[in-house]
Structures are given as C-alpha cells and as structure tokens.
Image: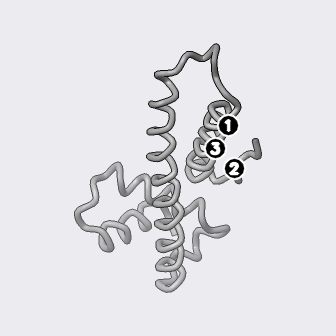
Amino acid sequence: MTCKELASRIETIQPSALPREVARLCLLLTNHVENMEALSDEAQLADAWKQTGLRLQAATDQHAAMTQELEQLAQSDPKKFTPDQVWVLVRAIKVQSQVLSLYVGQPPIDV
C-alpha cells in the first residue's frame, strides 16, 4: 500500500478531513503498524484506526491538562519553585515526549 492509497482510504472513512488531517492520519497510522501492507486489510485498518485514535485522544487530553498547569506555573517566580512545581515541568516533558513519539514512530523517552 502506498501513502496515496492510504490517503484515499482515509478520505473515504473521513470525507470531511482537510488535506493536512489526512496527511497527519497517514503518518500516525503508518507509525502504528510494522508493515504498511497490513493497512490494506479492512479489519487491520479499522483496528489501527481505533488504536491510533485512542492514543491521539489520550495524548491530546494530557497535553491540554499539562498546558493549563504550565500556564499557572508561568505566573510563578522560578526562583521560588517548589518540588511539586518542578514535577509539573518533568511531567510536561513526558507528555511532549509522548506526543512526539506518535509522530516519529519511536517509543517515548523515559525521563
């Protein structure tokens, strides 16, 4: 299966998707499977679609929550950070690593 064929199948599944969304979904789906040919099978494509959607939603939710915490942290004086505030920064790095791993197809780094 080529990226063009996968994009066509994605456009069939999600006809209202913008071109950049189709491209993003192609990348996420191909990173989810070992062999891109697996996505030719309807059942495997449906499973990869579901798993990718769940991972992306979880990462999106974590990112939104972390953004809110970071916005609150940004109003603090860095010279007076508490250990809890430092952990907010560490968790933010982990969340960013998870999001990045979805797009590069590598496991997230352990921090």
Q: Quadrant of the C terminus?
A: top right
Work out how far the residue at label 1 is from the one at label 2, CA to CA, in angstroms.
Answer: 18 Å
Of the residues shown, which amino acid type is indicated by label 3? Ser
For the point 52% across and 21% down, the residue is 76
Of pointers 2 and 3, the one earlier in the residue sequence:
3
- Which class describes the residues within 10 Å of circle 2: few (<14), some (14-19), or many (20+)? some
Q: Are marks 1 and 2 in contact (CB under 8 Å)?
A: no
**Relative to 44, is 71 above or below?**
above
User: Residues at badges 2 and 3 in contact (C-beta under 8 Å)?
Assistant: yes
Q: Earlier in the sequence, mark 3 or mark 1?
A: 1
Q: Which residue position holds label 3?
A: 97
Give the residue type that dot 2 points to: Pro
Secondary element at tag 1: helix
Q: Which residue, given by chain and number where applicable, does mark 1 sit on?
A: 87
Measured in 3D between alpha carbons, the distance from the residue under mark 2 to the one under mark 3, in whole angstroms, is 5 Å
Residue 108 numbered mark, or none: 2
Residue 30 placed where, x, y %?
Answer: 56, 62
The residue located at (52%, 54%) in the rendering is 59
Numbered tag placed on residue 68 in the rendering:
none
Look at label 1 and name its amino acid: Trp
Residue furthest bottom in the image: 43
**What secondary structure is marked by label 2?**
loop
